[in-house]
């Protein structure tokens, strides 16, 4: 689970394993695999870092991907 904030500042946690897409339009929109959408105050890059940190914490070996889509 990752800690995020709604646009009004209220915190909530989201299951990072259920995220399908993250977009900036200009607010950050997270779409889950069930098509539910969340608007969050964090920029897309910060959400991606939280996801990477979460998976690293639970010891899943993932490739770190830069924000332009190229592998580091």
Image (cartoon, helix red, strand yellow):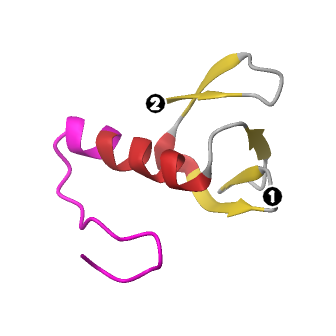
Residue 59 belongs to magenta span:
yes
Element carrying mark 2: loop
Answer with left or right where residue 27 lies relative to residue 19: right
Q: CA distance from mark 2 to mark 1?
A: 24 Å
Identity of the residue drawn at 73% across and 61% down = 24
Counting labels gives 2
Residue 62 belongs to magenta span:
yes
Residue 59: x %, y % from top left: 16, 43
Q: Nearer the viewer, residue 33 or 24?
A: 24
The residue wearing badge 2 is 1
Name which of mark 2 and mark 1 comes first in the sequence: 2
Give the residues in magenta.
54-72
Identity of the residue drawn at 24% across and 67% down = 63
Answer with left or right where residue 13 lies relative to residue 8: left
Residue 62: x %, y % from top left: 24, 61
Q: Please rate how many residues cluster around mark 2, counting C-alpha atoms within 10 Å: few if below 14, some from 14 to 19, many from 20.
A: some
Element carrying mark 1: loop
Identity of the residue drawn at 60% across and 61% down = 20
Residue 10: x %, y % from top left: 73, 16
Residue 47: x %, y % from top left: 52, 46
The residue wearing badge 1 is 26
Dominant secondary structure of the magenta stretch?
loop
């Amino acid at each position: 689970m990752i800690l995020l904030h709604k646009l009004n500042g209220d915190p909530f946690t989201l299951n990072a394993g259920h995220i399908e897409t993250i977009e900036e339009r200009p607010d950050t929109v997270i779409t889950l695999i069930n098509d539910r959408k969340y608007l969050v105050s964090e920029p897309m890059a910060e959400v991606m870092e939280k996801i990477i940190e979460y998976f690293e914490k639970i010891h899943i070996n993932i490739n770190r991907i830069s924000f332009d889509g190229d592998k580091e």
